[in-house]
Image (spheres, grey):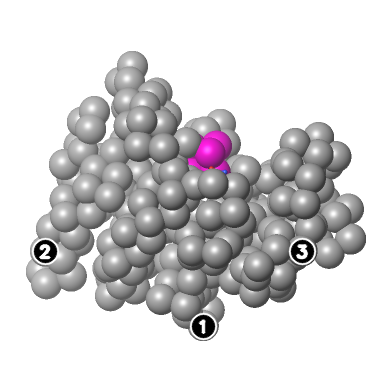
Amino acid sequence: MNLSVPARPYDFPLDPSRAALVVIDMQRDFIEPGGFGDALGNDVSRLTAIVPTVAALIALFRENGLPVIHTREAHKPDLSDCPPAKRLRGKPGLRIGDDGAMGRILIAGEPGNQILAELEPADGELAIDKPGKGMFWATGLHETLQDRGITQLVFAGVTTEVCVQTSMREANDRGYECLLIEDATESYFPEFKASAIEMIVAQGGIVGWVTPLASLAQVLSKEAVHG
Ligand code: TIU
């Protein structure tokens, strides 16, 4: 049964039996002071501020028995999955694989690569390492979602215009309906977040739908109460 979630550019027809939440890259290196994002000169406080909202969104899915998927932007320690075109774009000393304040930058298993403790994946939840900006590139995630009958993806995480938007666009091309929770995503650049949201909902929802957590929570909480 579809539930109508108030959203832009029009109501999102949520089918809880086919939906999953995807939390993109809420990892220490992008969000915590002293991490990679901070070292690049970004204001990480903008990203830290959404953590309670992302936690509430995850809790909403868990309470409703709906799947939650987590991603990390992570490369293998030997960098065999990091093309030079990606690695060499960074500043020397602050490149992927270099030693940072929280271990090697964007390398799987390093302290900075961990998802924030407050948002830790629960037992049984899928947590995938992705070497690209998008969550489908070199991850096998599409096949996993198809096996589970998932056709709708609700998005949260960072950053809005980079890994979140790329993942939504990749999802579009694979046939998923995408809903972005606007207060559970953030960018280091407020104007980029605002532009990304407008790009997503433009032209009748060319990339997908956007709504605040409260709109989704109101609909899903009613569903949890009334079944
Ligand atoms: N996760 C993600 O968005 N990776 C980035 O590198 N984002 C930036 O905005 N730099």
Q: Nearer the viewer, mark 2 or mark 1?
A: 1
Is-magenta flag for residue 164? yes
| Disc 3 element | strand
Q: Name the residue that disc number 1 marks.
A: 123
Q: Name the residue that disc number 3 marks.
A: 99
* Point 66% across, 67% down: residue: 101
Q: Which residues are magenta?
A: 162-166
Left or right position of 21 against 16: right
Pick the front one: 52 or 14: 52
Name the N-terminal-most of marks 2 and 1.
1
Is-magenta flag for residue 28? no
Left or right position of 86 against 162: right
Pick the front one: 2 or 193: 193
**Distance (Cα) linking label 1 and label 3:** 30 Å
**Distance (Cα) linking label 2 and label 1:** 26 Å
Give coordinates of residue 58: x percent, y percent: 35, 67
**Distance (Cα) linking label 3 and label 2:** 48 Å
Pick the front one: 79 or 70: 79
Pick the front one: 188 or 24: 188
* Point 69% across, 58% down: residue: 106
Name the N-terminal-most of marks 1 and 3.
3
Q: Amino acid at mark 1?
A: Asp
Left or right position of 187 against 111: left
Residue 191 placement: quadrant? top left
Q: Amino acid at mark 3?
A: Asp
Give coordinates of residue 68: x percent, y percent: 44, 66
